[in-house]
Image (cartoon, helix red, strand yellow):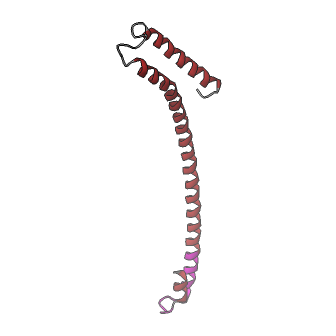
Amino acid sequence: MQKELDENENHFFMKKHLKYFGTISDRADGLMSKTAHLLEYAQQIRDAYQAQVDEKQNSNMQFLTVISTIFFPLTLITGWYGMNFRDMPELENGYPGVVVLSMIVVAVCIFVFKKKKIF
């Protein structure tokens, strides 16, 4: 645009005013450069923030995975012994054993996770 104004084909501007178009163009280029720099800086800040959010989310997902891993064996055990079939062995006296087994499974899972520094 500045080039077209400098050419002044229609002789609309006086010659003494044409020098100002170069100054305006230089200032516009400078502002465009600063804007591009600020845009890049804002992008870097957004990327740093997103990395921080991703790290927090990863930590939360790891914790939830550990909790789920602890409760999956318990779900299996309660599914087996919770059917209440008439001919199931240990139906009358088996529930305290299942409770103890569940506690042992939880303790072993927590021990393994702490030893591997996951939990």
Instruction: Say if 3 sits above or below 38 in the image.
Output: below
Above-or-below relation of 61 to 95: below
> Viewed as shown, does residue 93 lie left or right of 34?
left
Q: Quadrant of residue 80?
A: top left
User: What predominant SS class does the magenta segment belong to?
Assistant: helix
Residue 67 at x, y percent in the picture: 50, 27
- Is 20 a magenta residue? yes
Left-right relation of 95 to 42 = left
Against 67, is 103 above or below? above
Magenta span: 9-25
Farthest residue to the bottom: give it: 10
**Residue located at (49% from left, 88% from top):** 13
- Residue 3 horizontal/vertical position (percent): 55, 84
Q: Residue at x 34, y 13 (%)?
A: 86
Q: Tally the numbered discs.
A: 0
Quick one: quadrant of the C terminus?
A: top right
**Which residue is farthest front?**
87
Q: Quadrant of residue 107?
A: top right
Q: 108 or 23, which is in the foreground? A: 108
Specify whether residue 50 is painted magenta: no
Closest to the observer, 73 or 119 = 73
